Amino acid sequence: MTTLRRTACVAAVCVCASLTFAAQTPDPLDRTARRWVDSTLRGLTLHQKVGQLITSTSESTYISSDSDRFDDLSSRVSTLGIGGLHIFGGSEPAPRVLLNPAYGTVTLGDPLEAASLLNRLQRASALPLLNTADFEAGVGFRIAGATVFPRLMAFGAAGDERLAREAARVTAVESRALGVHVNFAPVVDVNNNPRNPVINVRAFGEDPAMVGRLGAAYIEGLQQGGMIATIKHFPGHGDTDVDSHLGLPVITHDRARLDAVELPPFRAGIAAGAGAVMSAHVQMPAIDASAFAPATLSRAALTGLLRGELGFNGLIYTDSMTMDAVSRRMSPGEAAARAIAAGNDVVLHAPDDAAAIEGIEQAIASGEIAMAQVDASVRRILEAKARLGLHRERVVNLEDVPAKVGTRAHRAVAEEVSRRALTLVKDDRSQVPLKLPRDARVLYLSVLDYPSGWRIAAPSRTFIPELEKRWPNVTAIELSDRSTQAEIDLVRTMARQYDAVVAGIFVRTASYSGRMDLAPALARLLNDLARSTAQAQQPFVAAFFGNPYVTTFLPDLPAMLVTYDYYDLAEASAVRALAGEAPITGRLPIALPGLAKVGDGLQR
């Protein structure tokens, strides 16, 4: 480490501590597993070896074994010889029309179908499949009926390593019941950029030491449940203002800053025994000054920094190769070959699996990729499969799914996280909890960023009925960027007729959207209501769902409750807190510029 970098560490004592962690060696294989790895590797052809470097994708809604969709998946397994399958939820077609863009296409998958599909493909595969998923917020994040946890920033607000560990263990138990072995979590990016359009609430927070501590606890929980943890997005995606699904983010900080902020959580995760790392489509000139060198395609980042300096010896996955940061610049074959040459072990979600395999094989033939490197990657993949016991048993018992997925005990853990994360940022008029008689007239405003894309979680669908249980006389109105000025003016006028005004403010940072704000007209309305309710001495409280930084654009709101999440659990928790039925103990894991600092949070 250079003198400059040592100086940066001394300036941040708690961060520097994480730089001392040593890489943890994976658990050794027993003799039978070692023999299986060695004999399997010796028996593979070049084509079979390259196939192991590919993880393809599938949705987990119902797929008949007698269908074109299943034939396609089966061919990827039996003909291409892919090494694993990545499971998404589901989707449904929607018309591409103007004036009414409110149709949603994303749906959740089905747990029994996910398990059934993976079993069928395991039986069709010559080698066990190492299956993956993005279960950042629990299996319920993608699969209906499974346990859904709050986003990781809620864990940062709760600040409890025990909760992070237990939530991860629950996620691992449910994942393994479905036949999923690798979770692309935890996110250990340090979200210190309020304008980050893609990480945001997916991160634990902005303090590197806290991110590393909670990330390590999450890794331990996944391992206890028998799952491989993946720390992402290496070497750090937190200080970006470009969505890598849409473009290439560039982080221009010098190496000293990267050592002090971005890298410590990865060091902590490696020390905690994370079995995998996901590389980021993010360019850092301080690591690789080449003209086009996102970390995913950078040998300096992966082989030099991650393998060499940080001593990581587990699996390295690319981020999705369909993302525009890479796919718009390179063909599937060229991108896959360059990713493997850089040091990735697995190419994830290539636009064309066959083309990716062909590109890698051509690069091996030309000498761009050494055969020894391919063998090393395949060995790591086979060892991971053996550690999971897949060489002994690769299919799951479908009877176990209802007993292990979405249980009341698992939901209780999620509820505790949600409750303890709630953070009261402001309460200038001391109106939280609300002190209203049961017959009070309440105006509830469901304020959305935009009305489309809410297919699996219609905003306020839980908040409104929960509010009505406490105060039956509720008038609920939805507003969004499609609300007319006349509609907004009507709401402004009618608010005077009510005993209290409650707002639920929903703003997402969704991949591919490029959006993360509330419409200016809606922000003006809320700030106007703050002033008019002050004059009329009406209670006015706001609960924020999703992007917490939206609070900084609404400085006049008298009471702000931040949930860091969307969906039913966050809405129910918020109403209970506003009604005084649950304590409010969360503290900000991020700074809200001009409004509050890290660690702030009123206690109730």
Image: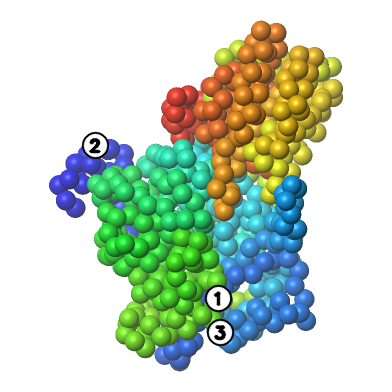
| Residue drawn at x 44%, y 31% as measured from the top left | 591
Measured in 3D between alpha carbons, the distance from the residue under mark 3 to the one under mark 2, in whole angstroms, is 52 Å
**Amino acid on which the number 3 mark rests in the picture:** Leu
Q: Nearer the viewer, mark 2 or mark 1?
A: 1
268 relative position to 104: left or right: left
**Height in image: 471 above or below 125?**
above
Q: Is residue 265 visible?
A: yes
| Residue drawn at x 77%, y 76% as measured from the top left | 64
Question: Residue 555, image x and y in percent?
Answer: 54, 22
**Amino acid on which the number 1 mark rests in the picture:** Asp
Using the image, tell me which numbered label, if any, was put on residue 11. Answer: 2
Q: Around disc 2, counting alpha carbons within 10 Å, would you say few (fewer than 14), some (14 to 19), or many (20 or more)?
A: few
Q: Nearer the viewer, mark 3 or mark 2?
A: 3
Question: Residue 467, image x and y in percent?
Answer: 77, 28
Question: Residue 468, image x and y in percent?
Answer: 81, 28
Measured in 3D between alpha carbons, the distance from the residue under mark 2 to the one under mark 1, in whole angstroms, is 47 Å
- Which part of the image, by quadrant, shows the C terminus? top right
Question: Residue 116, image x and y in percent?
Answer: 71, 72
Considering the numbered disc 3 on the image, is that residue within a helix, a strand or a loop? Answer: loop
Q: Are marks 2 and 1 in contact (CB under 8 Å)?
A: no
Using the image, tell me which numbered label, if any, was put on residue 80. Answer: 3
- Viewer-side residue, 574 vs 51: 51
Compare marks 3 and 1 and give the one earlier in the sequence. Answer: 3
Residue corresponding to mark 1: 352
Considering the numbered disc 2 on the image, is that residue within a helix, a strand or a loop? Answer: loop
Measured in 3D between alpha carbons, the distance from the residue under mark 3 to the one under mark 1, in whole angstroms, is 11 Å
**Height in image: 260 above or below 554?**
below
Image quarter of residue 578: top right
Residue at the front extreme?
98
Q: Around disc 1, counting alpha carbons within 10 Å, would you say few (fewer than 14), some (14 to 19), or many (20 or more)?
A: some
Considering the numbered disc 1 on the image, is that residue within a helix, a strand or a loop? Answer: loop
Image quarter of residue 362: bottom left
